[in-house]
Image (tube, rainbow, N blue to C red):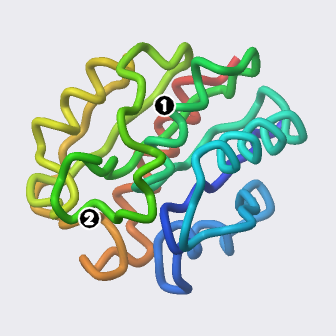
Amino acid sequence: MSVNLLILPGIGNSDAEHWQTLWQASGPAFSRIPQAEWDAPQRADWVRQLEASLQEKGPDTILVAHSLSCLLVAHWAPTTRLKPRAALLVAPPDPAASVFPPEALSFAQPPMMPLGFPALLVASENDPYASLGFAQGCAAAWGAEFVSIGNAGHINTTAGYGAWPQGRQLLDRLIAETQG
């Protein structure tokens, strides 16, 4: 069975030039979670949708989360019996940061406990939404491997990350490391 790659964008969804969108266009293994509300997300709604999407996709699914959806994964993991194959968590934002969107405050205080499945957390040293220390703390608490890619902003289109081949290599490594 081939792996399913479920894209979990952050607040506002991922634009046409974002690495998540470009990866999704690269092949049928990728699909995007459907959220009813991208601009004023409610944690309970997003958690329900993640549960439904993973139930549909099955356990051979790798979550590909950016920004707010990293916090979504942390909130969802302790509430479910479903386990994905793994998760790639990119640029988790710090809800205590002054730039954290007030529309997303329902995602504050993410559980700081092991996710219960393999994860790789990728962070930037100059992310305006989170310090490197916050990202390292999340990785440690969630039981995720930690990778810093240097000064990469929020690892999004604004920071110049379109296709992001380095990220795709990290995803490919995660796929290989978690095969049967």
**Image-based side of 68 in relation to 59, left or right:** left
**Residue, x 45% and y 55% (percent of image)?**
66
Picture layout, residue 41 above or below residue 143: below
**Image-based side of 143 in relation to 129, left or right:** right
Mark 1 sits on what residue? 74
Q: Nearer the viewer, residue 53 or 102?
A: 102
Residue 43 location (% of width, % of height):
58, 46
Q: Nearer the viewer, mark 2 or mark 1?
A: 1
Q: CA distance from mark 2 to mark 1?
A: 19 Å
Picture layout, residue 154 above or below residue 162: above
Q: Quadrant of the C terminus?
A: top right
Q: Quadrant of the N terminus?
A: top right
Tell me which label, 2 or 1, sits earlier in the chain.
Answer: 1
Q: Amino acid at mark 1?
A: Ala
Q: Amino acid at mark 2?
A: His
Q: Nearer the viewer, residue 133 or 157?
A: 133
Mark 2 sits on what residue? 154
Residue 19 location (% of width, % of height):
47, 70
Considering the numbered disc 2 on the image, is that residue within a helix, a strand or a loop?
loop
The residue carrying pointer 1 sits among few (fewer than 14), some (14 to 19) or many (20 or more) residues within 10 Å by Cα, namely many
Considering the numbered disc 1 on the image, is that residue within a helix, a strand or a loop?
helix
Residue 40 location (% of width, % of height):
55, 68
Residue 40's tag is none
